[in-house]
Amino acid sequence: MTGRLRVGSGRNGIPLPPRNAMRNPAIMKRNTPFSSAARAPRGLILLSSLLLLPVLCRAQQPTERFGGFFHIVFSNYRASFTGLPTVPSCCPQYDDGGGVGIWTGLLYEDAFASQLLFQARLGVVNVGGSLDADETTVVSVDGFATPGVIRHTIDARLWELEFMPLLVYKPFPKLSFLAGASGAYLFTRRYAQREALVEPATGSFENGQRDRNVSEGEIPDVRTAQFSLVAGLRYDFPFHAQRRWWGALEFFATAGLTPIVNDLDWHINTIRLGIAVMYAGNAPDPAGRVPEAVQPPPQRKATAPRSGDIPRAEQPETRGETSGIAVSTTRYDVRGERIVADALRPLLNYVFFDHQSAVLDTRYVALSPELARQFRVNDLHRAGTMRIYYHVLNIVGRRLTDHPAATITLVGCNSNTAEERDNLPLSLLRALAVRRYLATVWHIDTARMRLESRNLPEHPSYPTDSDGIVENRRVEIQSTDWDILAPVETEEIVQRFEPDTVHCAIPESDPGVRNWTISIRDSSGVVYRKRGNGAPPASLAIPSRGVVPGDAVSGQTFRISLATETASGASRSAMIGSFAVASSTSTVEQYELRSGRKVQIFNLILFEFDSPELTGYHRRVIEIIKKRMAPLSEVRITGYTDRMGEAEYNRRLSEGRARSASEALKKPGVRFEGAGETRMFDNDLPEGRCYNRTVEVEVVGRRAE
């Protein structure tokens, strides 16, 4: 956005406020979920009555639990307004924001069916946060037009007393789904507002300060009654064998129905993650619990496991019978193998912009600060080269976070044609856009990110060619720290087991069996469970990967047990087998095999436009390739170019690139050639053409053993 210029009486420039600076949003009528605040309580009372009705009408004694909970709350603001009612503001638009708080309180739960429960929660929740909006404008400093950024901020301190009735559906003994509504009273509702001149480093507003419209107090015209829809997920676990004390891992999501301020589009959604502790009194054991005791019964004929189904170790086989279940237990071995697959991909340090634009294109993946904290470069292992490139700002942000002493330089450029000719302010605004993302999302200190602006880049593409014009509209990320712009190295570890399936032979059971349960336990408890109705099958195929954890240790034993229940309600159980993790585990490096020979392919070198020369950065990349070559490896190098230029010229250029890489490898017998133009990556995109300016280094190892 470009505002009018105004020169102050002193040395400092003053950006003029927009025309709607003093607009009162309270007089702007907007559509809200309810036409009046009175409708929402009636709806909540009706919903609560429907939830409570089955509890009041149930015919059997319920299982009650009560306790407390504590959650971390991630609030997200959905907003579209220019300022609070009666509060002076120059913000063109607040769009979104949020914050982190807590939710804590008491809960009560009562079952009125085997899989359906009612739950009520009463607690306090902090949904405070901030709304930020950056306004890009042009200011006057010492009589010169200078790109400027004004940051508009509203910090909201919001606490609610919340009542939440929920229906709980429990399809599994420990997993529950929750849904309902919440009604809350907003008892703390204060705000603090300021507008700060962020860029440039010099200059001030008309008041002679770098801040204006600073105010705080109670939020005007606030709506104290807040209503939301709620959905959740919960995983229960008992603290001891009597199952009176329970813990739970919980996830909730809420969607706000009422605005914070009357006639303003400002709603709150939340994500809540936390724990609950509950006391169940004399609650019965959950349905499906497998009895632990095994009583020795009289001897009867057993059905042996099918031969050839399971690799057997040399442990002795024992036979017996418990409570009418014939038993045949044998110890089996499962061998594990860790498959390690690594990948190296080049990182293009350019961010491209549209014509006359200083806004980051949507093809670059933008994260929230919360998601940035969870971002790991290794999570991109299965992504392609271009998908990784679109995370370039997040990769640089993560690396700057991991290397707090590193710095970068952001060089803003333009095409120097048409409206962009000699437009250095536009180049600076583009560099500011990149710095703003790294500062606001990744919290990188702006002192670590130096800004430069120029017209054409130092190594421009053809400035008269349409493809070259597009490529020159960019910000170059530069750094003297190798770790910031190094090739992207990722790794994936997959656990594989032999055998991949354990075939469990199930002995005969008495007639009249109504249902059965197969359980597998290790020292930590049940790791696998399968249920069925009627008589159990003769055998059961169990995937090893679904049972044995990736961090299993050698010798770790897993016991297989069978429990049955007859029509009369009699329960019987026995151990029917076991298996253990063998001591012979191995780690395998994954790579491509061609005719029994190991092949690795590297595309790590990205050349400058129309250049076959290797830079100091490229020579560091060559060292990476050299370390991965065996002494007897065969090496073939193929050079490529983008589509710009004549075909024969591009073939010679690609050959020059291959020759440069061959000379840097300093390995006798390297074969190289130039392939010219390629469609390895999309030539219609500027980043695709940059990635096509490469060499492919194919390293073929000696014949595999």
Image: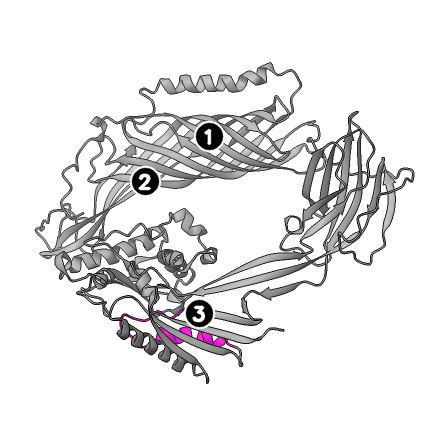
Q: Residues within 10 Å of mark 1 (few under 14, many from 20)?
A: many
Numbered disc in front, either 2 or 3: 3
Amino acid identity at mark 3? Phe
Determine whether 605 is above or below 526 in the image. below
User: Label 3 to label 1, Cα distance in Å?
Assistant: 50 Å
Q: Quadrant of residue 338?
A: bottom right
User: Label 2 to label 3, Cα distance in Å?
Assistant: 43 Å
> In x, y percent, where is residue 79?
30, 36
Give whichever of discs 2 and 3 has the lower sequence position. Answer: 2
Amino acid identity at mark 2? Asp
| Element type at mark 1 | strand
Position of 518 compared to 603: left or right? right
Q: Is residue 235 magenta?
A: no
Residue that numbered label 2 is attached to: 96
Q: Residues within 10 Å of mark 2 (few under 14, many from 20)?
A: some
Position of 285 compared to 14: left or right? right
Residue that numbered label 3 is attached to: 602
Q: Is residue 628 magenta?
A: yes
| Element type at mark 2 | strand
Image quarter of the C terminus: bottom right
Q: Are marks 2 and 1 in contact (CB under 8 Å)?
A: no
Highlighted range, magenta: 603-629
What residue sits 57% from the left and 28% below the top? 169
Residue that numbered label 1 is attached to: 230
> In x, y percent, where is residue 560?
75, 45
Asked whether the viewer can see residue 448, the reply is no
Q: Quadrant of residue 170?
A: top right
| Nearer the observer, 64 or 536 | 536
Determine whether 140 is above or below 103 in the image. below
Give whichever of discs 2 and 1 has the lower sequence position. Answer: 2
Amino acid identity at mark 1? Val
Numbered disc in front, either 3 or 1: 3
